Amino acid sequence: MSITANSARAYHGLQATAEPTSEGTSGTITIGQGQTVTTLADATSAIVFAVEVDSTYTVAINLSTLVPTLTGAGVNQVETATAAGTITASGNATVIVTGDDITGSPLTVSVAVANTDTAATWAGKVRTELNATAAITSLYTVGGASTAITLTRIADRYNDSTLNISLANGTCTGITTAATSADTTAGINPAKCWRISGTTYAGEDFEGADLPNPFVFCGIQVRSTAGEGGGTFLIDSGSFQDRLIVGETFQKSNATGIDSIEPSNSLTITGESSYQKAIVTLIYY
């Protein structure tokens, strides 16, 4: 038996204070409406889940079954550095790897190289040393051939614009400094939808019990919690549509039921520009 929601409520309000500046006036004026609580007395069920989409990807939630259809497979990010120059004095090459979730980033790795090593030879030594660095191999597969040194993201996710492999002389000489690597393949986060307390989602509450199918929706909130830059996503269901960017919130509620959202509809969230994440709450009976 699924959990029964009790004391469902909707909270809303928008308020500011102003100080009059006209001659002879003082004090403050309240503008707007403070927090208002609406009791959703008929509601018996509630569910919260997380949605992630990237550009053109969609999560369409069937509102009669609360089961999503995901459209959009992820793409593994690939970064490539190219070695150049023959070693003219033995020593250590300095390789600096930067990434938004690499432990110790920017991470400096010293690579022993020998006099007369060609670019292809010392690039192979760099690949070997990076392969021995757990902070890198926990997230990336090290690869490449000849003068190429590549990092391929193990798990597909959004693109890390900070990812970089820098090549330079440390105590050796002969390396042509390459401070910036190439973004060979941009990472794309796959469409995702899951229960807050788990990694899967199939119309169940957080204990894994099937939720009853909705009859009337009393409240919905879509809150954009993460994203890149000015990325946006579109939410669309029944007779309403709205566009959100990170930090924005959409909310509708009605104690007797929201006319613009029907169980026969789908709640579709579409990525319009780059990676976005949202938390969606539905209250219904």
Image: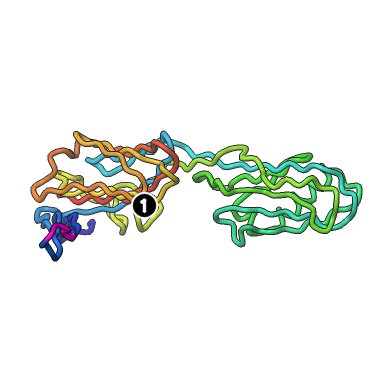
Residue at (73, 45) in percent of width and height: 178
Looking at the rendering, which quadrant does residue 149 occupy?
Answer: top right
- 162 to the left or right of 29: right
User: In the displayed structure, would residue 34 be above or below residue 167?
Assistant: below
Q: Which residue is mark 1?
A: 225
The x, y position of residue 223, in whole percent, is 30, 50
The question of residue 158 being in magenta is answered with no
Q: Nearer the viewer, residue 254 or 66?
A: 254
Looking at the rendered structure, the secondary structure element under dot 1 is strand
Residue 96: x %, y % from top left: 69, 54
Question: Which quadrant is home to the N terminus?
Answer: bottom left
Which range of residues does the magenta coloring cover? 19-23
Instruction: Tell me residue 106's x, y (percent).
Output: 63, 57
Q: Is residue 71 above or below residue 216?
A: above
Report crowding for label 1: few under 14, some 14 to 19, many 20 or more residues within 10 A (C-alpha).
some
Q: Give the quadrant of residue 92.
A: bottom right
Q: Position of residue 45 (x, y in %)?
A: 19, 54
Mostly what secondary structure, the magenta segment? loop
